[in-house]
Image: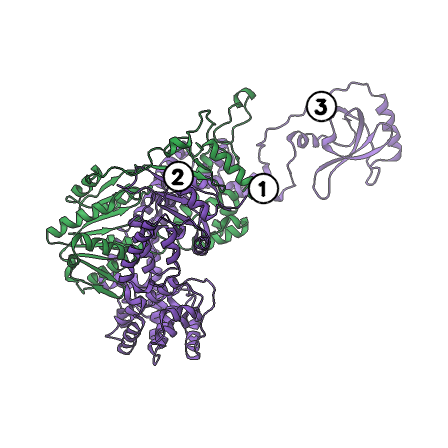
Amino acid sequence: MTTEELEQLLAQQPIALLHRLARGRVQRHFRAGKRRLIEVLLRHSAENRPGFESDLQTLIGEREARPAPAPAQAPAARKPKPAAAPRRSPYKPFEPESQEPGITLSSWLEGLGVPPPQTFVPDAWQEDAIAKLREGDVVVSVPTGSGKTYVAVEAARRAIAENRTVIYTSPLKALSNTKYTEFSKIFGADQVGILTGDRRDNGQAPLLIMTTEILRNLLYDAGGGEIDVRLDTLGLVILDESQYIADPERGVVWEETIIFCPSQAKLLLLSASIGNPHDIADWLTTIRPTPCHLIKHSTRTVPLRAGYLHPNGKLAPLFRTVGIPHGHPGHLHPEAKRLFEQYEDETLPSGRRR
Amino acid sequence: MPPSIHPVDLILALREKHLTPAIVFLTSRRACDEAMQAFDHSHIFLPPPRQEAIAAVLDKVIAQYPSIAEHPLIPTVSRIGVAAHHAGHLPSWKIAVEELMRHGCLDAVFATTTLAAGVDFPARTVIITQSSIRKSRDFMDLTIGEVQQIAGRAGRRGKDLVGFAIVTPSPYIDLTVLTKGFTGHPEAINSQFLISYPMVLNLLKAHPLDQIQSILAKSFAQFQLNQRAEVLERKLDELRDQMEPFGPRVCTDWITEWQTFDQVRRQKSHRAPVRRHEPPEVAARFHFLTPGRVVGFGKSRGVVLRQYRSKGQKSPMVTALRQGGGITESPSSTVTEVSDRILDCVDAPVYPWCTPESVEDLLRQLDELPTRLPELPILIPKDNEPIPDAIVQTLGDFACPTCPSRAACQSDYPLASKLRQEQQRHIKSIQALRTSLWHRFQEKIDVLQQFGYLSPTSRLTDDGEWARLIRIDHSLLITELLRADAFNGADPAMLAAVMSSIAHDDDRPGAFPRVSSGLGSLLGQVRKLAVSLAPHEDPPLLRADIAAVTERWIGDPSLTWIGLCKSTTMAEGDIYRLLARTLEFLSQLRTLKGTHPGLADSASRAIAALRRGVLEELP
């Protein structure tokens, strides 16, 4: 498609579609008018033309696949409001309002407290991840705070016991420093080293902590012939926060690291919950010598509850249920809903809801 | 009502419900700082044993990092048990806050949502006050993944039975973003394969050009592009099935054949007398509205005197003599009835289009006509009227007009051509998806060849050999500066200052020390070069005021950290990050010992001078 054709095609699309297309690509796209939006989109598309075009086609396809708005129905059939009314105010629930009342604040707060001290028993998925790492690479995608570090520590412990070098990378220098302190306490200061852009501490230790960029540079040097001896004994590479692979600027570093990671080393990718962990696992399976296992779960170790705190100090549950009603964003607690509407009425310019 | 809850009230409410410790995510650093100031005059002190616990933990951290001993927030932290944690603070301060949280000493930490990923400590509760975050100078809605990342900090394993994520509104909050974030499934992530110059150089150093394509094919980017291509291929197969009934007819490629024929036909008919969008009955009747014809206009009746087409719109018109003697000009569509009766009339070339005698004659005859007249049976053709013979003759090259499958072709053409267009579009997109990475890589190769880092055979030149060691942002600008010998004779302070102005990518305004004239002119040269490289690499901000901060720190070894902070309005944490990043850039220059000994030496000296005080504390 030439640029002119693309421009024409964009011009034919409704503005809503352009906004959907611009989401994640163009900042402040909601401020731009149609012509300006097309201009910016075209400029942006220069970077990844085919991706942009295929996104556009998907959106157009979705739009065409969507049935035309239903013709006016008989009044009797229209009574319960259809679930997907074409235009709805953003705060209307998405589903027909259920009459079931919300839970009370006290039952929402119930269970708050400190659990009795227990001996630590690893979760099944943690055991599974460590076991699977013997056979091949492992991708772990679990909610924040589930205990990914335990997997990293145990996996590192086993690799070190086999006289292998372990490299642990994190996206931020600050996180590297935290882990350095943490791992030094677990393994002993002589067992842990840290490499940053301009300094190396205990660089011969079996467990090395660095940012992913540093590891990528090591792998570059190894590829260029200046072989770093430690790469021969490298047994395990742990990439923490590997959802960074989608970072617009730095994501490519994770890809390069994974592509150039020596084949004798196992890869352990630790990631927060993401939508397509199986894609990452499938990808690793296609490019790595051993098949990749995906360890994935979405239940949190410590259950989460959502609440609403009004500026006047009044607390209410956010949802009608005690826990989070997954998949039902409209199940707002009546009290929270009322308070928020009141807040909007009082703080937003009159007659205009965002 | 206040636009958002007052920090003191917030802490009181949390304490009352036993929801502490909490992390409060706020919009900006300033909001965090203001929240801390709000506690200056409050009297919600912690009980003495807890204050002592905080002091004990702080003492331990201060022993390790003396730079935070005088931190202005310490009194508030130790008396009230709240702290701020954001990018404007020194890493050592952030470590102190994290340590306090880990010991459970604090009731709340105010942090910026922007740095949510860097907040690596859990709490019982997180407070969310906004639904969008600042991403490179702009506010964007939080994604589901981000909301869950933030909410994920709530609930400490082994210390809490449940965690709480509490939304409290502030201006510009959109509750749906958050409720969707809580209840939704995180977004799929997409590869962002940015091909950089150092990457091209390093890959070509290790692998010959013909292997590169297979290496790129191993990327997650290509994996996802292939997935997309597969989706398109499946669609393509579906389209092929849909195209099945439109298979070969009399001619194998009837769609193209018909398309050209149709185009020619349209062009021809465009030149032929205009047939606008007239209803078929109007067009059919128009031929019969000849002079003398008796026609009905609704209730009245008239005799056609002449027919013509209007000048502008070429719409069919008639001039008629009405009962009562009026002569009217009206569109032929106003004729409601065409009777099978023609009255004698003598034509005339000018108004009233017939001889005056015959007007009277006609009027008389009109009146004498019976009330009912037989209607003229007019055949109204369907839409696709036959092509006039004259055109068929000019289309002699086409078989279509006489082809037996012509009717089928004509009716199927719109659908079939649409399907085929879509098919071709898919084929093109699939090709593009399969090869785009390689094309992007080649674009970079072209630039590197143009600048002489790669030979025409895509081998590294001597310049390329050292340039591949510069693996930072704006690498092309830096390597070009080295080739232009821009740092020849520049002292370590100048070198570091230029590097920091290249490294710094924040346009937060502020007041800064003055820049020396030597540095100013050097930056001018750098800026010129950066502008000339703009087609190949986005130029850095190159702020002279930022460069001056680094220049002062290196140029004056007696300058203390406090003194440096006082000379600018930049936040401590920002200065730290600026210098740390400068260190990183300089250490890359230091690796060029073999080819640029003078520069490497200058960089080493700059590193030695940079790394003192606060910068020495952390690894």
For the residues labelled 3 and 2, say whether their Cβ atoms are less than 8 Å apart: no
Q: Which of B384 and A181 is in front in this view?
A: A181
Q: In this view, does A21 lie to the left or right of B610?
A: right
Identity, as a three-letter code, of the amino acid under mark 3: Leu
Identity, as a three-letter code, of the amino acid under mark 1: Arg
Q: Do labels 1 and 3 share a chain?
A: no
Residue linked to disc 1: A352
> SS class of the residue under badge 1?
loop
Residue linked to disc 3: B376
If the image is split into quadrants, where does the C terminus of chain A sit? top right
Q: Nearer the viewer, residue A60 or A284?
A: A284
Q: Where is residue A54 in the image (x, y as percent from the top left)?
A: 40, 45
Q: Which of marks 3 and 2 is nearer the N terminus?
A: 2
**What chain letter is assigned to the residue under label 3?**
B
Question: Vertical placement of A323 versus B61: above or below?
Answer: above
Identity, as a three-letter code, of the amino acid under mark 2: Lys
> SS class of the residue under badge 2?
loop
View extreme (bottom): residue:
B489
Residue linked to disc 2: B17
Chain coloured green in this rendering: A
Q: Are marks 3 and 2 on the same chain?
A: yes
